Amino acid sequence: MKKTTYPGNPYPLGATWDGEGVNFALYADNATGVELCLFSSAEDETESLKIKMAERTHQVWHAYLPDLKPGQLYGYRVHGPYEPENGHRFNPHKLLLDPYAKAISATIDWHDSLFGYEVGHPDEDLSMSTTDSAPFIPKSVVVDPSFDWGGDKPPKTPYHRSIIYEAHVKGFTKMHPGIPQELRGTYAALAHPETIKYLKDLGVTAVELLPVHHFISDRHLVEKGLSNYWGYNSIGYFAPDVRYSGSGMLGEQVAEFKNMVKALHKAGIEVILDVVYNHTAEGNHMGPTISFRGIDNASYYRLVEEEKRYYMDYTGTGNTLNAMMPSVLRLIMDSLRYWITEMHVDGFRFDLASALARELHEVDQLGSFFDIIHQDPVISQVKLIAEPWDVGEGGYQVGNFPPGWAEWNGKYRDCVRDYWRGEHSMLGEFAERFTGSSDLYRDESRNPTASINFVTAHDGFTLHDLVSYNEKHNEENGEDNNDGESHNRSWNCGEEGPTDNDSTIALRNRQKRNFLTTLFLSQGVPMLVAGDELSRTQQGNNNAYCQDNEISWLNWQEADKDLLEFTQKLIKLRRNHPVFCRRRWFQGQPIKGAGAEDIAWFLPNGNEMTEENWNHDYAKSLAVFLNGHGLHSVGPKGERIVDDSFYVIFNAHHGPLEYRLPPEKYGSGWTKILDTSESRAVEKDVVYKAGATIEVQGRSVVLLHRP
C-alpha cells in the first residue's frame, strides 16, 4: 500500500485534519528518524502503512497526507540511540502514542513487549527489547474538531461565589438508579438530566473532575485485579479517557465530553479538571516505553545529572516531567489552551503543582511555568488551583503560590479536623482559617478566595469515615495496610467502624454537621467531595485509588437524606448571604451606624477576645460576630452590597455551655436559624435580645441571625 505524502507543516503539533487531509507533527529533538504508522482497524496487530517522515523543521518532524479522515488510527516509531546511561531510550520496535493525540482508541493490554528492555534480563533496562509492541498498545486517533456548541458560554462564576464539588466521572453515576444502565459511569451520565437536577438542587457552582486525561492502570495493579481508578497516571494530555465514553465508538469520547460540558454550562455549572502535568504513566527507569520515553526521553523528563539512566522523582511515581524545557512547557500550555478553547472547560486543579515550579531543585515561585501562564491571555483567565505540595524536599508550599492562583489549603483541613476532634491547639489558628487564612495569603496581595477550603478530598477518609475510624483500613489495596496516610486527624467518636450504638451514631452525625457548617460558613472557596453530603463510606479505606468498585462508587440507595437536606440548606445560606463569601479581607474598622467592627470575636462570657485570649484553648469554645452592614463591597456595576448580620457560636467542648450574646452595639433581636445538635431545621420563633444567655450543646455550632 502506498500513500501520497507532502511535507506538511511543523505546527500545530499532533494530527490535524483540515477537511482534505491530515497534517502530522511530532517533536523529537534527539531522534535520528521518525516513522508514521497507519492502522486500518483497532484489531490490526501491525501497521498497514509505514511512512518515513523526511521533513524536519528545527526539532519537529512533519508530514501531510491527503485524503486521510477522522477516525484514522496511527502511532509512531522513533529511531535514535538506545543509551539509557546517557538518557536516551529510542527503540523503533516500540509503537508510541502521540503526545498530542486528541483521542486514544483503547486501554493498554499489558505485555512484556511494552517495555524498551528485555523483562527479566540481568542487565535490566540496559538491555534492549526487539519485540514489537504494536499488538498490545492502543492507537492514537485522528479526530474531527467540529462541534455545534449552540452558543455555549462559560458561567464565569467568580471565586467568591464558587462552591466546588469534587467528583469522579465514573464513581458519581455508576450506581445511580435514575440513569440508564448503559450510560452509568460516563461523560453522558454527568450530562443526564438526573445528574444536572441533583447538582442544581445541591447548589454547587462547579464540578471538579478527577483526572479525565487518558491514563494507564499500572501493570502490578491489573495483575492483582485492581486498577488506577483515580486516574493520576496520565499518558494523553489532550485525550479524554476512553473508559468514560458511553458510545463505544472510535473517537466519540471527544464529542461526548463536549456535550457534557455544554449541558453543565447550560445549568450554570462550571467544569474544572484535575490535571497531572507533573509526571507520566511511564514510571521510573524500569517502566514501559509508551510515548514520551521513546520519543525523546532526555527532552521530556528530569534526569539525574550524574546518572542519566535514572529519573528525578519529586512525585513519588518514578519520574517528573521537565517543565524547565521549552518543549515541555509548550506541551503543557498547548494542552491547557486546548481544553479551554476546544473543550470549553473553566479551570484546572494542578496535581502536585510544586513539582512544576522546580527550576533546578528548589521550588521557584517565579519559575518559567508561572511566568508563561501569567502572560497567557487564555490560560490566565480561567480558574487555576494548585495542590501546593509535592514529595520532594521543600515541596510543601501552602501560601507561596503567586497572585492569580488559588490553593488547596491543607492547613485549613488540618486545623478544622483538630478543632472538632478536640486536639489541643490555639484558637488563633482556627480564627485565621475561618476568616480566609490571611496569615497565608494577605501579604502577597491575594484575597480570601486564594484559599480553597476543604475538610476531606478524594485522597483520605470520606466525611463519614473521618468521624467513624481512628485508623486506616486499606487491606483491600493488597499492600498489607501499609499504604495511605497514617496520621488522619480523625476521631471515631468512641467506637471503631460500624456500630449500632445510638449515642455514637448521633455524635457522628453531629460531627458531620459541624464539619459541613464550618466549611460553608468560612471565608474562602469551599470544596465538597461528592458523596460526603450523603454519608458515603469507604469502610475506612483512606487510599481507594485502586478500588474501581462499590468501595469508591456512590451508593445512592443508602443516601443519608437528612444530611443531604442539611447540606443543601447550608449551601443556600452561603449563596444568599455575601457576608459568608466576601471578596476582600475583614477590615476590623468601625462601621458607621452599626457601632461595631465588621468582625468581632467573643468568649463564652460575652467579652471580646483579647490578644492574650488567643493563646489559650478555652475548651475549644468561642463565637464570632459578622457584620453584614460592614461588607465594604460593591457589585460589578458599582452597586453597594450589604447583608444581614450573623453570630456564630462554636462549642467543641464535650458538654453544653452557656453563651452570653454581645452587647447592644452589636445589635439585638437575634434568631436562631441553625443548630448542629439538631438534625432538622430549628424553630425560628425565639428572639434573643442583646446580652441574653443561650445554652449551646456540646460539640455543636449555633448560628444566629438578625436583619
Image (cartoon, rainbow, N blue to C red):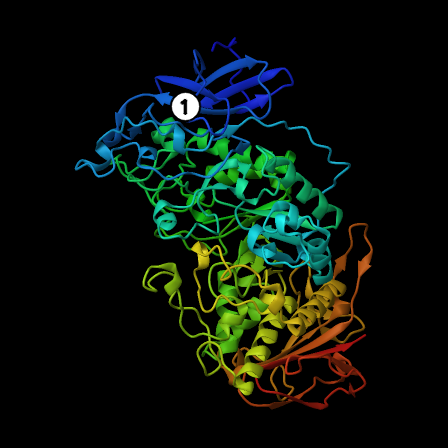
Residue 634: horizontal and vertical position, in percent? Answer: 77, 56
Front-lying residue, 556 or 683: 556
**Residue 215 shows in this picture:** yes
Crowding at dot 1, Cα within 10 Å, few <14 / some 14-19 / many 20+, comes out as some
What residue does disc 1 label?
A: 46
486 or 693: nearer the viewer: 486
The quarter of the picture where residue 67 lies is top right
Q: Is residue 624 positioned above or below 659 on the image?
A: above
Residue 581: x %, y % from top left: 68, 62
489 left or right of 340? left
Comparing 136 with 237, the one in front is: 136
Percent across and percent down for residue 241 are 53, 41
Q: From this viewpoint, is residue 28 visible?
A: no
Q: Is residue 621 above or below residue 208?
A: below
Q: Residue at the location (78% across, 50% down)? A: 636
Q: Quadrant of the C terminus?
A: bottom right
Q: Measuring from the top left, give residue 282's x and y in whole percent.
A: 37, 39
Q: Residue furthest left?
A: 122
Q: Is residue 501 above or below residue 462?
A: below
SS under mark 1 = loop
Identify residue type, mark 1.
Answer: Thr
Q: Residue at x 54, y 40 (%)?
A: 242
Q: Quadrant of residue 302?
A: top left
